Image (spheres, rainbow, N blue to C red):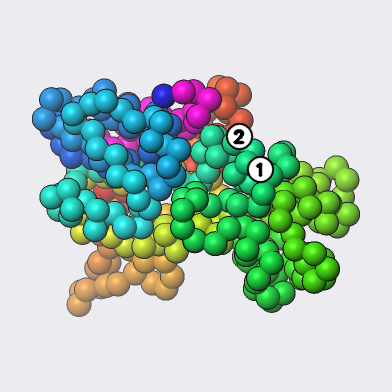
C-alpha cells in the first residue's frame, strides 16, 4: 500500500475493536489503500478470511496478494448480496472507515478537492450515477438549497442555490474553478476554503448517496454479524456519526428503540466503551484524522 494513497486512521484502535480471532471471518467495507485490511490479515491465522469492499476502481492498484483475502468491487450498501455470492452468511466483525480517501482528494481530476482545477465529477465509482457537474446543472433551486443546508450545514444555502441557478442559465458550471469563482464572493475572505469545503462535502454526499448507502449498510449488519461479533466504524462528519451512534444505541435512525412486552429494549447491538478519537500524535502526523470518531458495537 502506498502511504500516499491513504494513511489509515485510528488503525490500532479500530482493529483492536474488532476483537479478532485467528480463524474468524471479517469484512473491511472501505478497502481504499488497504491499510486496515493489512492489519486485519496480520492478526489472522491460516484459516482466517477477510473480504473487502471498494467501489472505486483505483483501489484495485492496492490489491493484496494473499489467499485469505478477497476484494469485492462494489458499494458496501450491497454487502449482504455480495457476501452471499461468496458463500458467506455470517461474519465475526465488520470494519468501516467512511468518507473520502486521501487518494480521492489528491487526484485532482476527480473533482473532490477545491485545490485543483478539474471537471466536477466527485463520483467514487466513475462508471455509475450522475456527476457533480450534472447535479449542479440540473437540480432545482430548492433541491440545491436543501442539500447545501442538510449535508453542508451552510446557513446561506438559499443564496448560493440562487446564484448557481442564475449562473448556469447563462453557461453550464462544469469545473471546480468555475464553481469556486462563483461562490467565493459570498464568503468571508479568511474562511473561503472552509466554506467551499462544506459546499463540496454537500455535493459529494448527494452525488454518491452516502447517507442512503450508510443506512442500507447498517440495517444489514445485525443479520450478518454473529452473536458477540463486532461493528467497528469510523466517521468523519456529524451526519455520519449521528447515524452510526443512533443505530448502535437504538437499532434504528429515528424514534425510540423497539421494546418487548416487558419493556426491555430490543436492540441488535450494545456499545462497547466510549467514543474513541485520535491521539494528538496521530492528528499531528495525519491532518485528515482530526475529525475522526470511532464507535464500536457488539452484537447481542
Horizontal placement of 15 versus 171: left or right? left
Q: Position of residue 202 (x, y in %)?
A: 62, 58
Q: Which residues are magenta?
A: 2-20
Quarter of the image with the C terminus in it: bottom left
Q: Main secondary structure of the magenta part?
A: loop
Where in the figure is residue 239, as x and y percent of width and height? 54, 57
255 to 228, vertically: above or below: below
Which residue occupies the foreground of this view, 173 or 287?
A: 173
Residue 269 visible: no
Q: Residue at x 39, y 72 (%)?
A: 256
Q: CA distance from mark 2 to mark 1?
A: 7 Å
Circle 2 crowding by C-alpha within 10 Å: few under 14, some 14–19, many from 20: some
Please say whether residue 145 is visible from this viewpoint.
yes
Which secondary structure lies at badge 2? helix
User: In the shown orientation, is residue 284 left or right of residue 91?
Assistant: right
Instruction: Decide whether residue 9 is among the magenta residues.
Output: yes
Please identify the quarter of the rendering in which residue 151 is found: bottom right
**Residue tagged by mark 2?**
106
Q: Residue at x 72, y 39 (%)?
A: 115
Q: Which residue position is annotated with label 1?
A: 113
Q: Residue sitting at 18 percent across and 29 percent down?
A: 67
Identify which residue, 172 or 231, lies in the foreground. Answer: 172
Q: Which x, y percent locates residue 289? A: 55, 34
Amino acid at each position: 500500500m502506498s502511504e500516499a494513497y491513504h494513511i489509515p486512521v485510528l488503525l490500532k484502535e479500530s482493529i483492536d475493536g474488532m476483537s479478532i480471532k485467528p480463524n474468524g471471518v471479517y469484512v473491511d467495507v472501505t478497502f481504499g489503500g488497504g491499510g486496515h485490511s493489512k492489519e486485519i490479515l496480520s492478526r489472522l491465522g491460516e484459516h482466517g478470511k477477510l473480504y473487502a469492499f471498494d467501489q472505486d476502481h483505483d483501489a484495485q492498484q492496492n490489491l493484496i496478494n494473499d489467499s485469505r483475502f478477497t476484494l469485492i468491487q462494489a458499494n458496501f450498501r450491497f454487502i449482504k448480496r455480495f457476501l452471499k455470492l461468496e458463500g458467506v452468511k455470517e461474519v465475526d466483525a465488520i470494519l468501516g472507515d467512511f468518507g473520502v480517501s486521501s487518494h480521492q482528494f489528491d487526484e485532482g481530476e476527480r473533482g473532490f478537492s477545491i485545490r485543483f482545477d478539474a471537471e466536477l465529477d466527485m463520483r467514487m465509482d466513475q462508471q455509475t450515477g450522475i456527476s457533480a457537474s450534472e447535479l449542479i446543472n440540473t437540480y432545482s433551486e430548492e433541491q440545491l438549497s436543501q442539500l447545501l443546508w442538510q449535508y453542508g450545514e451552510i446557513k446561506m444555502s438559499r443564496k448560493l442555490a440562487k446564484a448557481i441557478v442564475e449562473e448556469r442559465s447563462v453557461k453550464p458550471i462544469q469545473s471546480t474553478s468555475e464553481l469556486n469563482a462563483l461562490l467565493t464572493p459570498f464568503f468571508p475572505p479568511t474562511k473561503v476554503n472552509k466554506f467551499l469545503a462544506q459546499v463540496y462535502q454537500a455535493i459529494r454526499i448527494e452525488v454518491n448517496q452516502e447517507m442512503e448507502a450508510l443506512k442500507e449498510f447498517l440495517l444489514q449488519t445485525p443479520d450478518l454479524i454473529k452473536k458477540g461479533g463486532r461493528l467497528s466504524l469510523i466517521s468523519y462528519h456529524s451526519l455520519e456519526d449521528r447515524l452510526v451512534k443512533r443505530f448502535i444505541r437504538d437499532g434504528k435512525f429515528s424514534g425510540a428503540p423497539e421494546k418487548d412486552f416487558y419493556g426491555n429494549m430490543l436492540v441488535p447491538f450494545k456499545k462497547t466503551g466510549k467514543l474513541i478519537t485520535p491521539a494528538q500524535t496521530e492528528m499531528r502526523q495525519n491532518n485528515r484524522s482530526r475529525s475522526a470518531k470511532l464507535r464500536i458495537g457488539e452484537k447481542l
